[in-house]
Amino acid sequence: MIPINRTYAPVQAFVEELGRCGMRHAVTSPGSRNAPLALALAAEPRIEAHSVVDERSAGFVALGLAKLTGRPVALACTSGTAAANLMPAVVEAREARVPLVVMTADRPPELRDVGAGQAIDQIRLYGPFAKWFVEVGSHEPERSTAIHFRALACRAYDTASASRPGPVHLNFPLREPLAPIPEELDTGTWAGRDDGAPWAAIGHSQAGPDDSTVRELADAVSAARRGLLVVGTTRAPEETARAVARLAAVAGWPALAEPTSGLRCGPQAATGPVVAHYDALLACERFTGSEAPELVVRIGDTPTSKRLRALLEGSRQIVVDPDLAWHEPTRTAERLERCDPALLCGRLAERVAERRPRPDHVWLRSWLDADGLVPGLVAGAPEGFEPRIWNAVAAEAPHGSTLWVASSMPIRDIETYLPRADKPLHVLANRGANGIDGTISSAAGAALGSERRVFALVGDLALVHDLGGLLSARQLGVELTVVCVNNGGGGIFDFLPVAAAADREEYERYIATPVEVDLEAAAAMAGMPYRRVEKEAEVRAAVGSPGLVEVRTDRGTNVEMHRSLIDRLRAAISPG
Amino acid sequence: MIPINRTYAPVQAFVEELGRCGMRHAVTSPGSRNAPLALALAAEPRIEAHSVVDERSAGFVALGLAKLTGRPVALACTSGTAAANLMPAVVEAREARVPLVVMTADRPPELRDVGAGQAIDQIRLYGPFAKWFVEVGSHEPERSTAIHFRALACRAYDTASASRPGPVHLNFPLREPLAPIPEELDTGTWAGRDDGAPWAAIGHSQAGPDDSTVRELADAVSAARRGLLVVGTTRAPEETARAVARLAAVAGWPALAEPTSGLRCGPQAATGPVVAHYDALLACERFTGSEAPELVVRIGDTPTSKRLRALLEGSRQIVVDPDLAWHEPTRTAERLERCDPALLCGRLAERVAERRPRPDHVWLRSWLDADGLVPGLVAGAPEGFEPRIWNAVAAEAPHGSTLWVASSMPIRDIETYLPRADKPLHVLANRGANGIDGTISSAAGAALGSERRVFALVGDLALVHDLGGLLSARQLGVELTVVCVNNGGGGIFDFLPVAAAADREEYERYIATPVEVDLEAAAAMAGMPYRRVEKEAEVRAAVGSPGLVEVRTDRGTNVEMHRSLIDRLRAAISPG
């Protein structure tokens, strides 16, 4: 690198190290104070810098990119409320364990809290949501400064990505010159290692489960004739899916596959004993009554399904989580394993196979048979049943596509009704903090990191919450397919007691909150093709190319259809 | 109030007290966990509850409303990133000293940090930006609970509004029933005071300056023949304007009136020695050279003008601030008065008048005469000169209108070029943290509190940053006139060294960041009339009714026109 001036040189060294550590993407927002950050990121050849105007959207773009690629993404913004706008994405990154290197420009101490403008207290701005906070400080242009910034970058990259990944926050007080006005500086003072290596290479050894743990768990699994594997979101969905499918097969247990788990949509889904529609099945007494599982092994984050949680609450449960994040709302688990789930399940599958367990085949069969009934019922539901729409999108999405699914109804519909299929799909959702914000922006970020198509599955409230995301997608030059089920408000609330208990008018105004929004105009605003469709066949045709696809449905009718489908499933499972 | 059930009753008591304390408005966002907050606010007859879907926008709506009305506004949202989205508005409220009562719904402790969904660490979520934080707690349905919630509400209202106003944050852990399902509860247990009085009536005495302070300052003011009054944003712009105008008149000093001060646009502007165009004048040597002021009395927040700050740095300076917020970036003030500026200036005016000071009339005249030259130069500048557009809007705005001016170029243009006029206008801007975010939403909030017209003056980046604000305005049923000068990016950056120093392409992409946005479609999305105009006369006609008015300009040309106007002013002031 050629150091530009005393302000830029340390930032350039920092950014170069990020690139040497393996960073490939950064998201920057405009500003004067952060020009050194943005321009240094833009100039670093190993890093592609993407510019997004609205910092809230920028935050989610970085989150989506980091989540899809599994690598830390840098996020650079200027001082003041710009940095405060990153809060929602930083919160989600913390909860969803997504690595981010947040770089906020700040005024130096003498310009803070004196009315000098655009200066707020950025020290620990993200509170407990930042895994690590560093006030980078102001330094003389000398060798020790270069070393400080280079080592700091390596540590930031590693801290964001290692152990429990998450956002780290570095606050850069920057003084004039903020513009890249060249200054005579010694190149040697600023240089990194000769060979392009990171200043500090970081070695990682993966801790596998020890033999006694594997033995104990294999004993427990082999002894349980009626067992369940439950797989939620994990960091390595493909490896985990492979290992879990092997374990399920040898143990003779059904594997309940949350849609984001990688097990529901991929090669293992076709061959292994995978159950997709557990949420629907657990509405039937057959699966919640006398025949409780003897043991549940739960891997990754807790699925959203309330019915599944109720089942877990009454079951013997072992939870596997590489970071042991205590994702254990039932508080009844008798054992928690801080262990890589793919490694553990792989080892367990070998051991359990040696034991030749004698599972209850009727139990396994009953789950798989009942699971097999659901897709037909969904396909047979009337037009306008929202899960039919999402399933149509998933069916049309090409091999390897990403579906970014909004929290609230879309993720619940997908959890309950998306069938298993051997076509690999990346199903992603902001289920760390379960916000409906940032869905479009997250999908746009994923699109930056993917060579396949990206679909955002949203309701009208989630779309309204992230209109800026439509413009960000355009600014980033990515092509999204946004499928918006517009049911005039928050459809999820219609499923809750508040819908019946509250005064109708107040319910509509303060809870359901329909927003009058012309989605055709919203698409035009961002230069996106727009199509409005109604029937499933039209949805299938409409999602064949990028654009905004609006499907109007009726909240009330949809709730009825949900209830009626469950009634039909109950009747099919327990006739008479 | 009739208590609904054990979850609602304490919230109802809290909200009733807010109403009894004087609260008139609340802004709520949808959610299930916060249904008790939203529905209780909606049901309280003294409070008008406004529903806004996007919490970031809701935060700024509340801010705008509280800023215009000077009263605390409640802001209620659900748990998770919903609460994180309020961060930008909370930050601005802290810096701009705007009273807010932020009520976040939360899951109770047993559902936090266990993967139970939509639960994040909301304890001290807003860090140092909340003036007061309370974890409200969970309580049995008994009299002591009612007392706790009633007293808490009085304290929250008072803390938000008293001394240095700002946001307070109350976190409400809420358990089932979250729906307003009626339960048998004793009305007497929950009752407030019989007479509709607040649970705790709070007395305030206004501390005036003591006699010795007034004497000392009057001595100093009377002794300085060439003095300056500088008036920025204050909490009571009208009273302050009256008192400052009196003081300026008796002291024979020019009063440099920042546009948000209330002194530039109002009855005092026509009669008193008020200078509007100080920023332009200070580009001329005449006003920065030998004839420095002997004393400056500065009132309220520091004006934005860099040139004025440079002048202040070299001057003897007394700063008056009711909260002594250390709005003193120059660090050269020799005296700071923690005192109500209207009271102090009123008392000073009396005292100074008694002293019969002998001001330097040439000094006063030179400021006023030079100030009088600027409006003609602006009017004579070519079409497309952005300050001409803003001045045209201000000229057309009816008596008592509000102009909410975006940070970055609009507020700087207005500061430099908006002429003084006796027509009262509320000029407001988010100059606490100086963010460009939330401008449309803030204006929508102001419109809720105003019976006159409200104009939002924005550039394209500020508009793009708050597209949700357009929908919020529609949802709130307010009619805004949004005037957007679209110069394809951040025009302010073209004035900075970075524009010349950076690589052209990188400058455009990472700093100026033009966003392709179809503003006609953006207006249609929110059901707003749209007009695109070019010439000043068209602007004047277009702002006659609500809607989105787009004026395209050229960033580069605009910079040239700014420079050329200053050149002409210099020539006019110092001929030859």
Image (cartoon, coloured by chain):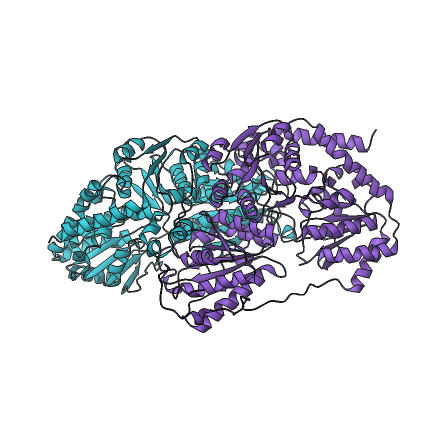
Chain colours: A purple, B cyan
At 67% from the left and 26% from the top, the residue drawn is: A382
Which residue corresponds to the image point at 13% horizontal and 57% vertical from the top-left? B357
Residue A140, percent from left and from top: 40, 71
Left or right of A168? Residue B549 is left
Residue sticking out furthest to the front: A195
Q: Which of the two residues, B164 or A346, is positioned nearer the viewer here?
A: A346
Is B284 rendered above or below residue B382? below
In front of the other: A434 or A430: A430
Q: Is residue A239 left or right of residue B152?
A: right
Q: Quadrant of residue A141?
A: bottom left
Q: In the rendered image, which quarter contains the C terminus of chain B?
A: bottom left
User: How far across and down, in percent of the image, does residue A4 sit?
Assistant: 39, 63
| Camera sees residue B120 | no
Where residue B542 appears, as percent x and y from the top left, is 31, 31
Q: Indicate the position of residue A482 as horizontal and vertical percent values.
A: 56, 37
Would you identify the image quadrant in which residue A9 lies?
bottom left
